Amino acid sequence: MTGSAAVQTNIKPPIWKVFVDNLIHLPWTWRITLGYLTVMLFIPIVAMFLKASTESPAKFWEIATSELALATYNVTFVTSLFAALLNGVFGTLIAWVLVRYDFPLKRIIDATVDLPFALPTSVAGLTLATVYSENGWLGSLLAPMGIKVSFTRLGVGVAMIFISLPFIVRTVQPVLQEMESEIEEAAWSLGASEWQTFWKVILPPLFPTILTGVALGFSRAVGEYGSTVIISSNTPYKDLIAPVLIFQRLEQYDYAGATVIGVVLLGISLVMLLAINFLQAWARRYDNR
């Protein structure tokens, strides 16, 4: 009897039972957090992958690498990268001006940077399409030079620049605020020019943060739909982007095609999030030196 009892006591409970027991004994804040994340994030993501897994690997590859899909990936990712890199330069400059200088209407301009966060993307697209149309304020100035923005790939880029700009500015701005201006003054006192000071003193510790902002802006631009669907012509092989193609597939009741392309975008977004976390960890290690 003693031997059998010892054997029974050595039997490990199922993993799911251990998980449930640990979950029950977690603080209520943890339980609420896990429940919310499960319902709002984990279940939808898993459901997307499960839906895509119903397709055979050959069918999945055929849809994901079709000529139209590859064309939309090209427009989406190349234009998003262009918008993110451009905002990386000008967003950093805007953050620098807002932190280092005092001027009239500074608070209003600073608040305006957050406008793309609050403005519905469809309204942003309508505004940009109106302003950059051939009869618009800016479009009428560009038309004589042969530059057309609305209903072109350039218009898609303008929309992506508009909606991703705050991500770069708001990522770089706090880091600039923590940088002491005495460092710049010390470099100037040693004979360094403003350009040398920026390139050798300011940029090195700021560069990881700029990369993080660029990655965030790129991820945001890749998933943009509301503004781009209005300012572009949505013509295949011209300016059609992947999020709009997904919507078109749903309108055609092609749920398999929409799901596969959605999974491709989701996978790339997850990779970008991992890259962002890596860049943030790199920035923290750099700051601790």
Image (spheres, grey):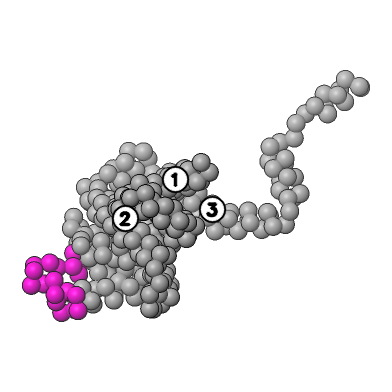
Density class for disc 2 (Cα within 10 Å; few <14, some 14-19, many ≥20) is few
CB under 8 Å between discs 1 and 3: no
Q: Is residue 93 rendered magenta in the image?
A: no
Task: Give the overall secondary structure of the magenta segment.
Answer: loop
In this picture, residue 147 sits left or right of residue 209: left
Secondary structure beneath label 1: helix
Q: Is residue 22 left or right of residue 171?
A: right
Measured as percent of width and height from the top left, residue 250 is found at 34, 60
Q: Earlier in the sequence, mark 2 or mark 3?
A: 3
Residue neighbourhood size for the residue with mark 3, other residues' Cα within 10 Å, grouped as few (<14), some (14–19), many (≥20): few
Single out the mark in the foreground, 1 or 3: 1
Q: Is residue 137 magenta?
A: yes
In the rendered structure, the answer to whether residue 104 lies left or right of residue 152 reads: right
Disc 1 versus disc 2: distance between alpha carbons? 27 Å
Percent x, y of residue 93? 33, 61
Which residue in the structure is indicated by mark 1? 279
Q: Residue 74 shows which numbered tag?
A: none
Q: Residue at coordinates 87% horizontally, 25% vertically from top-left?
A: 5
Provide the residue designation for mark 2: 194
Circle 2/circle 3 CB separation < 8 Å = no
Q: Please, what is the three-letter code of the amino acid marked with disc 2?
A: Glu
Q: Which segment is the magenta one? A: 134-152
Q: Secondary structure at mark 3?
A: helix
Residue situated in front as seen by the camera: 91 or 101:
101
Mark 3 highlights which residue? 43
Q: Residue type at mark 3?
A: Ile
